[in-house]
Image (tube, grey):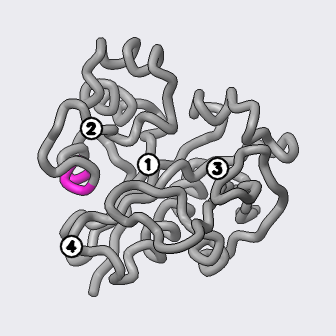
Amino acid sequence: MSWETHPVTPERFEDFADVINPNRRATHCWCLSHRLRPKDIEELGGGDRERAMRTLCARENPPGVVTYLDGVPVGWCNIGPRAEIPRLAGSKLIRPVDDVPVWAVVCVVVRGGHRRRGVTGPLIEGAVAYAVSRGAPAVEAHPVDPAGRMDTTMAFVGTRAMFERAGFRVVGTTDAVASKMPRLVMRRDLA
């Protein structure tokens, strides 16, 4: 098995779409809802969610990475500088724990047909490597450990165990609540 992870640039947009929205539904999330406010989506895409995401992919810091297994796109991680993620930067519930200019994992998606096959490990490592290549001092995540079964049919923020396996440690909690518990702030320092 050969794993590769690359930023989702305009040239890799179709691979990203194969993971996140294989049927190219116009009303699908396009992995924007947790990153951008509705007014930001309108501004970037004129109401077209796909166009808004394509615009993000052309920026200096593309909005995440696509992971490939033997050349097939199988995973997506929405990651970027916290300051460039308006929904997170302006959140009153998930506030910064300090003044470190962290990068943040917003969500993780494993392509249908490839779930429960070990994709998230290489995906998170690839996302961290991308952050390192852009000078990030640390990467944060805000996982949720649901009571019962995880809904793996769509994007999710990950679990504590998933990020612990990737070398993240708990550095705080948020005021956001999931499964009746405060969400954690987990960090992997890169310096």
Tell me which residue sits at (61%, 67%) in the image: 145
Give the main secondary structure of the magenta stretch. helix
Q: CA distance from mark 4 to mark 2?
A: 19 Å
Whether residue 79 is in magenta: the answer is no
Confirm whether residue 9 shows in the render.
Answer: yes
Give whichever of discs 3 and 2 has the lower sequence position. Answer: 2
What is the CA distance from the residue labelled 3 to the residue labelled 2?
A: 32 Å
> For the residue labelled by badge 4, is the local secondary structure a helix, a strand or a loop?
loop
Q: Element at badge 1? A: strand
Q: Nearer the viewer, residue 4 or 183?
A: 183
Q: Determine whether label 4 and label 2 are within 8 Å by CB.
A: no
Disc 1 target residue = 64
Q: Earlier in the sequence, mark 4 or mark 1?
A: 1
Label number found at residue 113: 4
Please tell me which of labels 3 and 1 falls first in the chain.
Answer: 1
> Answer yes or no: do the residues labelled 4 and 1 have beta carbons within 8 Å?
no
In this figure, what is the number of numbered marks?
A: 4
Do the residues under discs 1 and 2 have CB atoms within 8 angstroms? no
Point out the image quarter for the C terminus: bottom right
Judged left or right of residue 33, residue 187 is: right
- According to the image, label 2 marks what residue? 28
Task: Mark 3 or mark 4: name the one nearer the start of the chain.
Answer: 4
Identify the residue shown where x is 50% and y is 60%.
127
Q: Nearer the viewer, mark 1 or mark 2?
A: 2
